[in-house]
Amino acid sequence: MEPATQANQEYVPAESGLSKEQHGVIFQRGLKWLAIGVFLMAISFAINFLLFQSDQSFHVPMYVMTSAGLICIVKSMADILGF
């Protein structure tokens, strides 16, 4: 049997990783998604805070806007951490 790798050949890693420019672009996109998510969560909190004592329904901002903000934040973490 022969060994899987030849002893006289040098190891050359595959260039499957992102370049610094590509990583920077994805990182900036992640920051934008983070800002959008934080904005949606803050607006949802403000609407819930203002409508809490009134007789109006605040289920839409409580569930929809909060969920959209959370999805944006998860997307941003995936971009920033490189998943």
Image: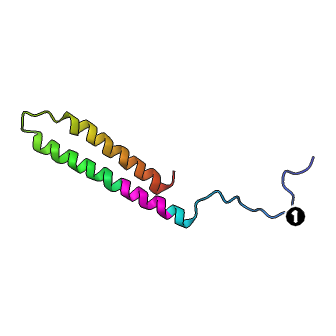
Q: Outermost residue toward the right?
A: 1
User: What's the coloring here?
Assistant: rainbow
Q: Residue at x 21, y 48 (%)?
A: 43
The amino acid type found where label 1 is placed reads Asn
Height in image: 50 above or below 7?
above
Residue shown at 75% from the left, 62% from the top: 12
**Furthest residue toward left:** 54
3 displayed left or right of 36: right
**What is the magenta segment's predominant secondary structure?**
helix
Determine whether, in the image, residue 35 is placed left or right of residue 48.
Answer: right
Q: Position of residue 55 (x, y in %)?
A: 7, 33
**Tag 1, which secondary structure?**
loop
Q: What x and y, as percent, mark residue 16?
A: 64, 56
From the top left corner, tell me how far across and down residue 17 is, in percent. Answer: 61, 58
User: Badge 1 is on which residue?
Assistant: 8
| Mark 1 surroundings: few (<14), some (14-19) or many (≥20) residues within 10 A | few
Residue located 53% across and 66% down the image: 21
Q: Which residues are magenta?
A: 24-33
Query: Is 25 in the magenta?
Result: yes
Residue 67 found in image quarter? top left
Q: Is residue 31 magenta?
A: yes
Q: How many marks?
A: 1
Q: For this view, does 2 lie left or right of residue 55? A: right
Q: Residue at image x 7%, y 38%?
A: 53
Residue 54 at x, y = what percent? Answer: 6, 37
